[in-house]
Structure formats: structure tokens, C-alpha cells
Image (tube, rainbow, N blue to C red):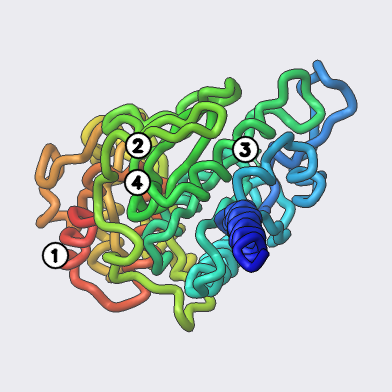
């Protein structure tokens, strides 16, 4: 009898341990926070086949609830940081976003972050965060090209895949990533390459970091450039960034735009140059004038792919200019704004562009 009771007690204990293990396996999903900023992924239109719609209409909780099985990937919480089309993305939202991400990732309760964002300026936000997030936990931006009301809307699967990447411990240390259309891109490399189709994001020179197919993540290679925990840039105590503008070069382009920006108080100007960061003689003269007055001028290229050589057709020492290296004009602007938070020489800035 005593032996029977011992067997019963042992069996009960085994059942209890087994049930407890299953229960904790279920609750041990990673914790992912979705920070929503707006964009077409939160957009809505009157017709499922029409092109007209408005960005930033749907709230984050509605978006999460519309994605089947997403809560099986992670314990999810949504926060609405803004609800704008990313053409209205601002330095203020960037700073709020970066500070909130750093706050969340500093706690052991948060394993990863997803940011929903319009695609128009997503590469700028991703690159900004890549320089100022102070954690190696996954931070993933996503968006969509079709609004939530469209036939074959791409937002739900993009959000599902973004959460899968953010919830995956293997994504740690890759810096900030962009997940769209089954692909994983590095913030440093990704570019919006096509205005409206769903394969808008590409990393044409450097290639993908990996793929994510219905949540199954494969990461092929590590990102280029220094990022996140290794970056010297920080948003601690920062409430604004120095004004930096972009001037687009073209045949017979006007040079007085540069003079205007200097008089308007620009601290930095990025030239979206022709070819290897070139510009016409009149623009070069205006640039020389600007750099003599202390305005920092970076030469990038309007060509979609490729780097700008230091000392190519433009003598950088003579004109006081800096090459953007492999950053396109919009990302060069982001780096210049952060770099100009402290006083730096042209030579020091050139090193910054080579490093980041
Ligand atoms: N204008 C939209 C935005 O950037 C486009 C998009 O999300 O695809 O917010």
C-alpha cells in the first residue's frame, strides 16, 4: 500500500512538472514592442483597387489584431509614437523614437523592437537609429507599399515577418534592419529604389543580410559599417540637430541656392552631385565660399548606386569638401547632422564618413 502511494505521488509529480514545463514554454515567448509611426502600412483608402489613400489612419492595436498568428511569434505590445506619412517624419520624432527604444531595450523584459514606418524616408530613420541605438538586441523597421485597405495589401505579412526577425535571438548584433517583401536589409545599405512596387527596398551594392519567409529567418552575412553599441553617437540630452540641407546638382544648375542656404543658417550642405559627386563651376565656387564661412559641405552622388571618391574630379582640399563615401545624399545628411553635434574639422569629418 505504502509502495502504491509512493508510485502515485511520483506519477503526480511527473505530470505536474510536465504540465509546468509546457505552460512556461508557452509563456516564454520573446517580448517584442511594436512602435508605430504611421505610413502606408497604416494607410486606408476608399477603394481596394484605387491608388488614392491616406497614410497613418489605422492604429497599431488594430494592425496587430489583423495579422493572423502574429501573437504566436512573441508577446506583443504596441505603442503609437506618431501616425504620419513618412514624408512628414521629423527630427523630433527621430529623437523621441531613439530615446524610447534605448529605454525599452535597457530592460531585460524587452527582447526586440519593431517600428512601423512609411517607406518614403524609412532608410533615413533606419540609418539614424543604427547610429544612436545603444543595444545589440534586434531593431527592425517595416512598412508597406499598399495601404491596409488594398487588394493584396503587403503590410500584414511584412509586419508578421518583422516580428519574427525581432523575436529571433539569432538577429542580435546585426544593427538596425529593414524587413520588407521577404527580405532583410541593413540600415546602412538599404535604399528605396522604385517608387511604388512592393520590392521597393533594395541593397544594390552590398546585398541582403538575409531573408524571412513566413517567419522563417535566414541571415547570410553581417552588416557593413560601425553601428549601435560601437557607434560614438548618442541622443542622450539631445533635443535638436543642426540644420543640414541637400542641394541637387544637374546640368546648368543654379549656384545661388547654396548662397541662400548659407545665409539661412545651414550648418552643413550635402550636394547630391552628378556622377562622382561633381557639380558645375558656379556651384563649386559657391561651395568654396560656403566652406570658407565654416559651413561643412559633403559631396554625395545623385546616382543611385556607388561611392564618391575622395579627391576625384573635385579637389576636396581646395574646396574644403568632404566625400560621403558610400552614403547616398539623404543618409549623408543624417550622419552630418549627428557629427555636427560637436565641433569637428574637415579632416575629422572625412574620417567619420569613412567609418560610418
Ligand atoms: N508616403 C508613404 C510614407 O512614406 C509611402 C509609404 O509608406 O509607402 O509614409
Coordinates of residue 232 in the picture (x, y in percent): 29, 70
Mark closer to the observer (2, 1): 2
Q: Distance of mark 3 from mark 4, alpha carbons?
A: 23 Å
Pick whichever of labels 4 and 1 is earlier in the sequence: 4
Q: Which residue is mark 1?
A: 347
Mark closer to the observer (2, 4): 2
Q: Is residue 331 above or below residue 16?
A: above
Q: Which residue is found at the position 67% from the left and 41% from the top?
A: 70
Pick whichever of labels 2 and 4 is earlier in the sequence: 4
Mark closer to the observer (4, 1): 4
Q: Which residue is found at the position 40% from the left and 38% from the top?
A: 185
Q: Distance of mark 3 from mark 1, alpha carbons?
A: 44 Å
Q: Which residue is mark 4?
A: 188
Coordinates of residue 287 in the picture (x, y in percent): 28, 54
Q: Which mark is residue 219?
A: 2
Q: Which residue is found at the position 35% from the left and 46% from the top?
A: 188
Q: Quadrant of ligand 1?
A: top right
Amino acid at each position: 500500500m505504502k509502495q502504491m502511494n509512493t508510485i502515485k505521488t511520483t506519477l503526480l509529480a511527473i505530470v505536474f512538472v510536465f504540465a509546468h514545463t509546457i505552460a512556461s514554454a508557452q509563456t516564454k515567448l520573446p517580448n517584442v514592442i511594436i512602435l508605430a509611426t504611421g505610413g502606408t502600412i497604416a494607410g486606408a483608402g476608399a477603394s481596394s483597387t484605387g491608388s488614392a489613400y491616406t497614410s497613418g489612419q489605422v492604429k497599431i492595436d488594430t494592425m496587430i489584431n489583423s495579422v493572423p498568428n502574429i501573437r504566436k511569434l512573441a508577446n506583443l505590445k504596441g505603442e503609437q509614437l506618431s501616425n504620419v506619412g513618412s514624408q512628414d517624419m521629423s527630427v523630433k520624432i527621430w529623437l523621441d523614437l531613439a530615446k524610447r527604444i534605448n529605454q525599452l531595450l535597457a530592460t531585460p523584459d524587452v527582447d526586440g523592437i519593431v517600428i512601423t514606418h512609411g517607406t518614403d524616408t524609412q532608410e533615413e530613420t533606419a540609418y539614424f537609429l543604427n547610429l544612436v541605438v545603444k543595444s545589440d538586441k534586434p531593431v527592425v523597421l517595416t512598412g508597406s507599399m499598399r495601404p491596409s485597405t488594398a487588394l493584396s495589401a503587403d503590410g500584414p505579412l511584412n509586419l508578421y515577418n518583422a516580428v519574427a526577425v525581432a523575436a529571433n535571438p539569432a538577429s542580435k548584433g546585426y544593427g538596425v534592419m529593414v524587413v520588407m517583401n521577404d527580405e532583410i536589409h541593413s540600415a546602412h545599405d538599404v535604399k528605396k529604389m522604385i517608387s511604388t512596387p512592393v520590392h521597393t527596398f533594395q541593397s544594390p551594392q552590398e546585398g541582403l543580410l538575409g531573408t524571412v519567409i513566413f517567419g522563417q529567418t535566414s541571415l547570410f552575412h553581417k552588416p557593413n559599417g560601425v553601428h549601435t553599441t560601437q557607434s560614438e553617437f548618442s541622443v542622450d540630452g539631445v533635443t535638436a540637430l543642426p540644420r543640414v540641407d541637400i542641394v541637387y546638382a544637374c546640368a546648368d544648375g543654379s549656384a545661388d541656392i547654396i548662397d541662400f542656404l548659407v545665409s539661412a543658417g545651414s550648418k552643413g550642405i550635402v550636394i547630391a552631385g552628378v556622377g562622382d559627386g561633381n557639380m558645375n563651376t558656379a556651384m563649386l565656387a559657391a561651395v568654396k565660399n560656403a566652406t570658407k564661412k565654416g559651413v561643412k559641405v559633403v559631396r554625395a552622388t545623385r546616382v543611385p548606386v556607388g561611392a564618391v571618391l575622395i579627391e576625384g574630379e573635385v579637389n576636396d582640399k581646395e574646396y574644403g569638401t568632404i566625400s560621403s563615401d558610400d552614403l547616398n545624399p539623404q543618409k549623408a545628411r543624417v550622419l552630418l547632422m549627428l557629427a555636427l553635434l560637436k565641433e569637428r574639422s574637415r579632416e575629422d569629418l572625412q574620417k567619420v564618413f569613412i567609418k560610418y
